[in-house]
Image (cartoon, rainbow, N blue to C red):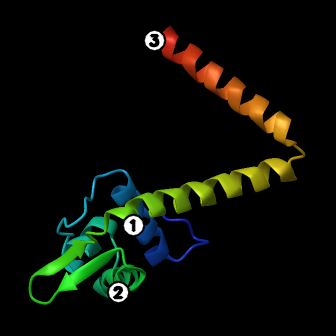
């Protein structure tokens, strides 16, 4: 994983883990890697890995069973809510950037449609 210097590493790892949850790679009740394994996977120190799990637990994304490990939250509704929140953030950032470039809503829709057409044409060329 490549880290962005403008955002704390622990937040970037949390974002990646949340994406895995939304994509179904981490399912409700799944055992998460140990703090040590998480530290190795994301090339962070163990204190950072422990902080990642503390922050995620406080937000309700996971829970810890002492002596057993950390598990993905079993609350099914959380995943749909998380997906909507993450999509809303991406869309908001996108719209803000497009508006900063001077695009209006209709222009943005046209850009998206053209992008999709180009993508489809590219798929057909292969």
Residue 29 found in image quarter: bottom left
Query: Which residue in the protein does label 2 denote?
Result: 54
Q: Quadrant of the C terminus?
A: top left
Q: Is residue 57 left or right of residue 87?
A: left
Rendered residue at 25%/59% (across/down): 27
- Mark 2 Cα within 10 Å, few/some/many (few <14, many 20+)? some
Q: Decide if residue 2 is in sight here.
A: no
Q: Secondary structure at mark 2?
A: helix
Query: Which residue in the protein does label 1 denote?
Result: 78
Q: Is residue 74 left or right of residue 99?
A: left
Residue 11 x/y as whole percent:
48, 74
Separation of disc 2 and disc 3 at Cα?
A: 46 Å
Residue 58 x/y as whole percent:
39, 86
Q: Secondary structure at mark 3?
A: loop
Rendered residue at 64%/19% (across/down): 117
Q: Nearer the viewer, mark 1 or mark 3?
A: 1
Residue 10 x/y as whole percent:
44, 77
Q: Nearer the viewer, mark 2 or mark 3?
A: 2
Residue 76 found in image quarter: bottom left
From this viewpoint, which residue is outermost toward the right? 102
Query: Which residue in the protein does label 3 denote?
Result: 126
- Mark 3 Cα within 10 Å, few/some/many (few <14, many 20+)? few
- Mark 1 Cα within 10 Å, few/some/many (few <14, many 20+)? some
Q: Secondary structure at mark 1?
A: helix
Rendered residue at 47%/69% (across/down): 12
Q: Considering only order in the chain, which callout, 3 or 1, is on the residue closer to the N terminus?
A: 1
Q: Considering only order in the chain, which callout, 1 or 2, is on the residue closer to the N terminus?
A: 2
Rendered residue at 14%/90% (across/down): 66
């Amino acid at each position: 994983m490549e880290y962005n210097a403008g955002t704390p590493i622990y937040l970037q790892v949390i974002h990646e883990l949340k994406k895995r949850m939304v994509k179904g790679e981490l399912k409700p009740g799944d055992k998460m890697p140990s703090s040590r394994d998480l530290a190795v996977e994301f090339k962070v120190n163990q204190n950072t890995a422990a902080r990642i799990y503390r922050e995620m637990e406080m937000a309700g994304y996971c829970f810890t069973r002492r002596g057993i490990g950390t598990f993905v939250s079993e609350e099914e509704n959380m995943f749909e809510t998380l997906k909507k929140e993450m999509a809303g953030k991406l869309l908001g950032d996108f719209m803000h950037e497009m508006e900063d470039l001077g695009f209006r809503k209709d222009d943005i829709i046209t850009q998206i449609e053209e992008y999709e057409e180009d993508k489809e044409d590219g798929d057909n060329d292969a």
